[in-house]
Amino acid sequence: MPLNALQEEVPVVEAATRWSRLAARLIDGLVCFAPLPLLFFPYLGSVAALLGFVAILAEQVWLLVTRGQTLGKKAMDIAIIRSDGGVPPVPWLLVREFAIPLAVGIMRYGGHSDPSPAGKAFQFLLGFVWLIDSLFIFSPTRRCLHDLVADTHVVKVD
């Protein structure tokens, strides 16, 4: 088989832009908080908000494990793929999208209750790690630190 034939079979993917990744993250954040106004309605408002949040979370997870997208990524026509071009394994996707941000958020929140210098230093360190992770987007491959850890790329899709 000639080398040209091999090159034609390899799909060319383009990394998602930094702005599309930011927009997708913002859309996901807005979607997740969409049920909160229901809390202002008496009686069934909190139940409706909880059910709304669970439905949104289920949709996010379903899109993530079947297409490598969240609602925000789908809206921005971007998706998460592995370095080999496939959809990443479900555990890595869930850790990448939910567990890491949740763990960092919980630890940062816990740091607020510890006024000691060690507690403040720990809280600063977590914020610094989050900043470094985000700044990796300015690398030539546009991969954040969590992308490198999970061996993923965020790419444009048609």
Image: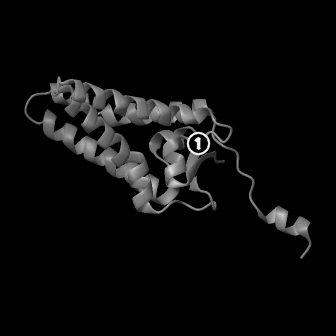
Which residue is situated farthest in the left direction here? 43
Q: Position of residue 77 (x, y in %)?
A: 59, 42
Q: How many marks?
A: 1
Q: Position of residue 102 (x, y in %)?
A: 31, 42
Which quadrant of the structure image shows residue 43?
A: top left
The color scheme shown is one colour
Q: Position of residue 142 (x, y in %)?
A: 62, 39
> Is residue 17 shown above or below 4?
above
Q: Amino acid at mark 1?
A: Arg
Q: Residue at x 43, y 49 (%)?
A: 96
| Camera-side residue of 39 and 116 | 116
> Is residue 27 shown above or below 77?
above
Residue for badge 1: 143
Which residue is situated farthest in the bottom direction here? 1
Label 1's element? Answer: loop
| Camera-side residue of 73 and 49 | 73
Q: Position of residue 154 (x, y in %)?
A: 58, 46
Which quadrant of the structure image shows residue 116?
A: top left
> Is residue 48 shown above or below 63?
above
Q: Residue at x 34, y 37 (%)?
A: 32
Q: Look at the image and tell me in which quarter the N terminus lies.
A: bottom right
In the displayed structure image, the side of residue 124 where residue 111 appears, left or right: left
Mark 1 Cα within 10 Å, few/some/many (few <14, many 20+)? Answer: many
In the displayed structure image, the side of residue 70 where residue 152 appears, left or right: right
In the displayed structure image, the side of residue 150 where residue 158 appears, left or right: right
Q: Residue at x 41, y 47 (%)?
A: 97
Q: Residue at x 48, y 45 (%)?
A: 146
> Is residue 40 shown above or below 10?
above
